[in-house]
Image (spheres, helix red, strand yellow):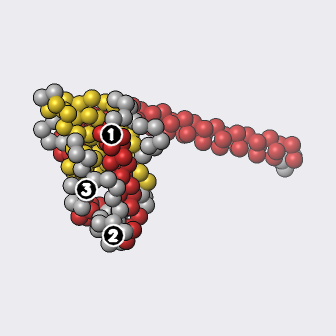
Amino acid sequence: MAETKTEKKASSSAYYIRIIGTLFAITAIVAVLLAGVNALTEGPIARHAEETKAQAIAQVMPGADGFETLATPDGMDDVVEVLLAQKGGQDMGYCVQTSTNGNDGAIELMVGIDQSGAVTSVSILSQKETMYTNKHGELIANFPGKSGSVALTQDGGSINAISGATITSRAVTKGVNSALAAANFYLEGGAQ
């Protein structure tokens, strides 16, 4: 016996409803699993980020035994956090966390700046730059002792860019300049 058009249509509709229901169930299961993985990894990821930050602060401001969080100066969008570093109750300088955009995403830095306004050290907190990964030490080594404003040699400054990673080198230089500007704001009597 042949199926009528109505029976074919009903059969076809049931098929599509089953497919949609199956896809919805799979999507719901995957969403629940992803939420569970996120809940399990959220704490360890946050702890790792804090440990990385603490190590970076110790690197850029060795010997500091106390820190005071200062307000980020207005208009300094690349500045994430400014810490006044102290040793034995005396001001040592500033640890400034910055975030700038490189070629492959955000580059987060911790920059130490002493009381004279000179860079003590720079530490990479996070970055995803493919051309930069193995050569970041070459670029970072250019910054200690620099003050005021810095630029790459091809931009009229004294910082040597990494060959093949000029965009990344400019982003790191921009982050260091933002840190210098924030520290200088406070060194020149900005509100604490």
> First in sequence: mark 3 or mark 1?
3
Q: Circle 2 is placed at which residue position?
A: 153
Which of the 4 image quarters holds residue 165? bottom left
The amino acid beneath tag 2 is Thr
Q: Earlier in the sequence, mark 3 or mark 2?
A: 3
Residue 175 shows up from this direction: yes
Q: Mark 1 against mark 2, which lies toward the viewer?
A: 1
- The percent coordinates of residue 8 (x first, y second) are 81, 46
Mark 1 lies on residue: 188
The local secondary structure at tag 3 comes to loop
Look at the numbered disc 1 and give the secondary structure of its residue.
loop
Per the rendering, the mark at residue 146 is: 3
Q: CA distance from mark 3 to mark 2?
A: 14 Å
Task: State if disc 2 and disc 3 touch (CB < 8 Å).
Answer: no
Residue 65 in sight here: no
Q: Residue 2 in the image: x percent, y percent?
A: 84, 50
Label 1 is placed on what type of residue? Glu
Pointer 1 or 2: first along the chain: 2
Q: Nearer the viewer, residue 21 or 52?
A: 52
Q: Residues within 10 Å of mark 3 (few under 14, many from 20)?
A: some
